[in-house]
Every structure is written in C-alpha cells, then in structure tokens.
Amino acid sequence: MKRRDLLKGIAAISVSPALASCAPKEKAPIRILDKVGIQLYTVRDRMVDDVLNTLTQLASIGYREMEFAGYFDHSPKEIKLFLDDLGLTSPSAHTNTQSMRETPEQLIEAALVVGHQYIVLAGLRPEERITLDDYRRHVDLINGFAEQCHEAGLKFAYHNHAYEFENLDGIRPMDLLLAETESSLMQVEIDFYWAVKAGVNPISYFEKYPGRFPLCHVKDMAPDGSMVDVGAGEIDFSALLAASQSGLRHYYVEHDYPVDSLASAKNSYSSLSKLEF
C-alpha cells in the first residue's frame, strides 16, 4: 500500500455502512483535547541547559502533561517540585532495557516520587532486535519488570518505532510482543508517525488489540515521509484520536529532529489543541 493511500484511508477503516436504518442519526459531539502533553525529548537541547525554565516555557504555551526521557541531572524530588510549582503532571517517563535489567527498583522509586503512572520502554537498540528470538527474550524482561511495576501500583508500556512492524520470518514483532504479554502487564504507547512510516494503519491495531493503547506520540509526516510539526503533514489525527477502541488517554506531541525545538512545540500545540475529532 502506498503511503499516501494509507494516509487517506485511515478514516475509512473504522467506518461501517449504515445497514439497519435509513433514519437520520444524531451527530456525534465534537471533541477537543482537554490536556495536551509533550515528550520532552523534543526540547532536549533546552532541557540540558535549564530544566525549570524549559518547563516554564512549555507551561506558558499551554502544555499540561510532561513525558520525561531522563531528568537531566536533577533528582526525582526536584523534578516533582518543578512540576508542582507549575501546575504540571508527568503521567509517564521513558527508560531503556539496561535500566530495566540493572536498576529496576531505582526506576520504580523515581516514578513513584515524580508521580508517573507509566514507565515506558523507549525501544530496542539495533543489536537487541536482530531475530524473533531477541524479541522473545525481551518479552521475558518485559513481563518480569512489568510485574514489579504492577506490584508497586505502576503500569508498563512499550513505545514503538517502525522496526516492530517489519516482518521477521513472516511475523511482525509488534504482534509477538502484544500476543506474548498480558494486557494487564504491557500496554503500548503508539507512535503514530513511526507506525504510518512502516505502512501500518494504527486503527487496525486498535481493533485487533482494543484498550491496549493508553498513550500516544503525535508527530506528523510530510508527503516525502519526513517528520514535521503536527498540522504540517498528512496524517489524519482526527480519525486516529476518534477511534474509541484504542483506550487513548494521554497525548504527547513529539518531534525527533526540530530545527527550533520551542517553535516546533508551539506549532504542534496550536494544531493539536484545536483539533476536532
């Protein structure tokens, strides 16, 4: 399937013909997001220099939920104070497989201090995902760490890139991860850009694995496949956010390679905060 056809078809996949009645139906109410979040990797250049000032600027734009990818040499207690002073929350934070293996208790303790609800595995390094057996070994790691999270009152999620949707021996690794983990233990932070980049319609996964996608990364795609600010590309976010079977509750703007990170954050917030679905 060509990418352009996929983008145009996102809205159509979950629409069924009206067979039961020709009578007019009430129009669904228009929704907009009451809270917009941002993955702080977007503004990592500014976070390195001044965490508090960066969070303050993001709050002034209108962001209310922050997703961390490291605390930039601040303690979890300091991060919590920054968030509280600005009226912000951080429902989730990213981590990596090394920390899950070597310092799981530290990850969990930090999450409890800051107030995260989810610890999210950001992805796998190239050498960690060569074969399906590599993914199966990570299922074991995920199940063990996710159980620890569950016992502490936290949740675990996996963040996708494009590679989890590329066939390995006829199997998509994302399907393997979802099939071999319990829904109560592993959920998914769906990255819309990377899923579409891989030629996947995210709604097909919402339908196959309903309720397992509580978090998402909202980043847009230009006609040439490059990453752009939300609203500057072709992905139909209205259709994606309206998919009720997804389970979506937290929506994070992200841009991996912004030229001006704060300007990118402003542009994406302006588009996503006004989006109707």
Image (cartoon, helix red, strand yellow):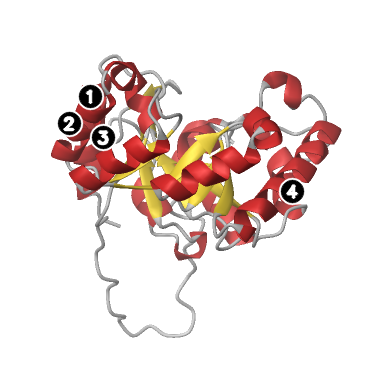
Q: Assess disc 1: are there few (<14), some (14-19) or many (≥20) residues with their C-alpha within 10 Å of its C-alpha.
A: some
Question: Looking at the rendered structure, which numbered label has been put on residue 144?
Answer: 4
- The residue where tag 2 is placed is 57
- The residue where tag 3 is placed is 268
Tell me which amino acid carries mark 4. Gly
Judging depth in this view, the residue of 116 and 193 nearest the camera is 116
Q: Earlier in the sequence, mark 2 or mark 4?
A: 2
Q: CA distance from mark 1 to mark 3?
A: 10 Å
Q: Are marks 2 and 1 in contact (CB under 8 Å)?
A: yes
Residue at position x 55%, y 34% in the image: 95
Residue at position x 28%, y 79% in the image: 26
- The residue where tag 1 is placed is 262
- Left or right: where 260 falls relative to 117: left
Q: CA distance from mark 2 to mark 1?
A: 8 Å
Q: Based on the displayed image, in which of its 4 quarters is residue 30 positioned?
A: bottom left
Helix, strand or loop at mark 2: helix
Q: Quadrant of the N terminus?
A: top right
Residue at position x 76%, y 46% in the image: 176
Q: Assess disc 4: are there few (<14), some (14-19) or many (≥20) residues with their C-alpha within 10 Å of its C-alpha.
A: some
